[in-house]
Amino acid sequence: MLRGTFRRGSPGRKVLGSALPSSQGDEHLSPFRELLARGPFRTFLTAGAASFAAPTSSLVVLLWTIATAYPDTGAGHTAAAYALAFLGLSSTIPTLAAAVFSGTLADRADRRRLMQEVNLLALFATAAIAFVLYLRPGGVVVGGGGFYAPVWVLATFPLWAVETTAVTIFRPTFNSSLPRLVGRAELGSANGLVYASAVGVLVAGSLTTSAALGWVGPAPALLLPIALFALTTVALAVLRADLAPRRERPPRRFLSEAADGYRYLFRRRELLEITLSALVVNFFSAVAFVELALYVQVGLALSNAVFVGAMLSAGSLGSAVGTLVINRWRFEARAGRFLAAFTLLQGLSVVGLGLVHSPWLALPIMFLFGVFPGMFTTVFLATIQATVPEDRLGRVLAADEVGSYGLVPFGQYAGGVLTAATSVDATYLVAGAGTVAIGGLMAALPHLRRLGFTPTDEGASAPSEGPGATPVADGPSP
């Protein structure tokens, strides 16, 4: 089923099947080397990697700080589970609203400027969270059902909502900009490099932040995500590429253009099936991983925050491997079948976490859990970027985010309720079994099974390094 990879040739080479005097390993690395040789792509990659990694470092601080703000008792665990769930719920409305309109903004505005603005917003929100954790205002708010929270915990909720909202706008804007920098045949390799780099930064950031929690406390630990957001700001400022979307028709009313992205998604039945499947899969993932800090504390019986970072890092390393390894296979023509298989395997890995209580088993399983979403992300993004016209790409990516992540906050709440009512192990088993079921359903959907595209060498060639050089990729027909 899985065959060798295609290679993106430089000018003068055949792209597919050319006989080069290099080893097989060099052939697999060639697309990555060619992309990294381009200054604009390297700068773009730096901006994306830093911005994508920063929120996870913030989340490590928030998850551990909130989880350990309660007594290590049954009642304390119940209150902590609800508090972690409410952390996710706090960003529900603003994040979904941002996802609804972020693609329309990306298709109308200068994408680089839009990324700069929302990245600065995320930077300021993270700095404000650090300020709250430093001051720790006193007082406790008591709710029903055993829930109570210190005032400083509640104060982090709206600030986390601002950070996640900014990142939600940044993500489809960034992803819809990538085809302006690389050719169609390079999309898989380019996405793999971007997300593998982000994961590398994320792993280093998660480990550093979790270690810093015990050494210097939560507020100073947030200096790392603040620095990452600042690095994104600098990279976008020096990026030499025109990312303003090319339009074939004059802009219409904002709401009309927003609705057009959803109409396009509904007309593309296979894309709609992926979106609805991802909606449920991400719900189940949220059910399990909102309770990751409690899984480490209770399920693995570990009391150091560094192990939360280690679990996140193991999953992230797996994701990095997945984003790169998938480019060794010709997934393009069979993209839908690959996506179904990766979902099924992801579910089995979550079931595995629910069955083990040893960190020496949990860490490699968490690594495998990361591999399959990493592969999924690369295949999905390359397929969307290759088959959706540029003037709709931002809206389609944003529409997918609405569908994909719309149930995540509800999954986070469900995870808190399920853990409080049963156990952490039961939560992971339920989430894993649900994901396995969705993977099987995806494999049976006819339109999704036929999803794919043919890689060609159309689009950007290696750009010059001169000022104003703008690599351009021709958008495919719908």
Image (cartoon, rainbow, N blue to C red):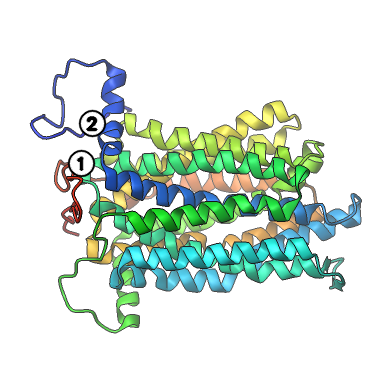
Residue 100 drawn above or below residue 64: below
Circles 1, 2 touching at the beta carbon (< 8 Å): yes
Instruction: Return the residue nearer the eye: 396 or 52.
Output: 52
Q: Quadrant of the N terminus?
A: top left
Return the residue found at the far bottom: 253
Instruction: Return the residue nearer the eye: 227 or 169.
Output: 227
Residue 26: in sight, yes or no? yes
> Badge 2: few (under 14), some or many (20 or more) residues near its Cα, within 10 Å?
many
Residue 46: image x %, image y %?
40, 47
Q: Which residue is mark 1?
A: 455
Please, what is the three-letter code of the amino acid marked with disc 2?
A: Phe
* Left or right of residue 65, residue 2 in this image: left
* Left or right of residue 335, residue 456 in this image: left
At mark 2, the secondary structure is: loop
Residue 319: image x %, image y %?
49, 38
At mark 1, the secondary structure is: loop
Q: Which residue is mark 2?
A: 6
Residue 85 drawn above or below residue 211: below
Q: Which residue shows up at 81% across the image and 56% down it?
A: 421
Q: Earlier in the sequence, mark 1 or mark 2?
A: 2
Instruction: Return the residue nearer the eye: 203 or 450.
Output: 203
Please, what is the three-letter code of the amino acid marked with disc 1?
A: Pro
Of the numbered discs in the image, which one, if any, rests on residue 31?
Answer: none
Residue 331 drawn above or below residue 92: above
